[in-house]
Structure formats: C-alpha cells, structure tokens
Image (spheres, grey):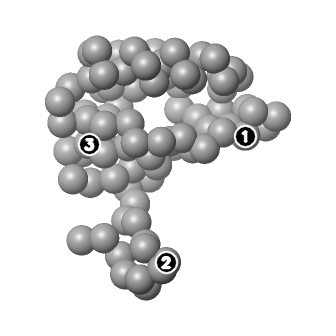
Amino acid sequence: MPRFIVVHKAPFTEEELIARAKAFPNYAPKDVCWRCSYSDFAGKKHFCEWEAPDETILKRVLKLTQTPFETIHLVRRLDAVNAEFEK
C-alpha cells in the first residue's frame, strides 16, 4: 500500500489529536490507515503518516474529516537498521 506524509499547519492540541485518532476507525474507509503522527505543538506543525490507495482518496478522507493540510508527499520507508527500503 502506498504511504504518504501529510503536513498540517494547525493549532491541534494533544487532546484533539487523541480524540481524532480514537474516532477515526469508526468512519475510515477500510483501505485507508492513519499510522502515526509527529507533532510540533509550539510550531503548530504536524507530520502524519498514512497508507492509502492513492492521493485522491487520501484527500477525500482529509476533506471529510475537516482536517486542514499544507502538503501531501508520497514516500517510501527506509529501514535504517537493515539499510533497505520497504518494497
């Protein structure tokens, strides 16, 4: 499944992100998965890893959940310990 990093500039709080994460499985399409997030609360920047069939479907999910975003990047994960990219 393709992976994406979505960059958000938004004043999300810890509590809001936790609530969103808990609610997401209740309405997520089965082929879309929010894997994890890295948050810079002071800078109001959040970097979220997603799996989705394509960017168009991911954008639909972000719009449905009223989640603002700056950019979406198609990425590949490097396992630095084994020096290999995921297939």
Labelled disc at residue 52: 3
Q: Are marks 1 and 2 in contact (CB under 8 Å)?
A: no
For label 3, the crowd category at 10 Å Cα-Cα, with few meaning under 14, some 14 to 19 and many 20 or more, is many
Residue situated in front as seen by the camera: 9 or 30:
30
Mark earlier in primary sequence (1, 2): 1
Q: Secondary structure at mark 1?
A: strand
Give residue 25's quadrant in the image: top left
Mark earlier in primary sequence (2, 3): 3
Mark earlier in primary sequence (3, 1): 1
Image coordinates for residue 6, horizontal then vertical, percent: 48, 42
Seen at 45% across and 24% down, the residue is: 21
- Distance from label 2 to label 3 (Cα)? 23 Å
Q: Secondary structure at mark 3?
A: loop
Seen at 40% across and 42% down, the residue is: 35
Labelled disc at residue 54: none
Q: In the rendered view, would you say 30 is above or below 81?
A: above
Q: Nearer the viewer, mark 1 or mark 2?
A: 2
Residue underneath mark 2: 80
Q: In the rendered view, would you say 80 is above or below 53?
A: below
Image coordinates for residue 41, horizontal then vertical, percent: 75, 33
Label 3 amino acid? Ala
Labelled disc at residue 40: 1
**Residue 41 in view here:** yes
For label 2, the crowd category at 10 Å Cα-Cα, with few meaning under 14, some 14 to 19 and many 20 or more, is few
Q: Secondary structure at mark 2?
A: loop
- Distance from label 3 to label 1 (Cα)? 24 Å
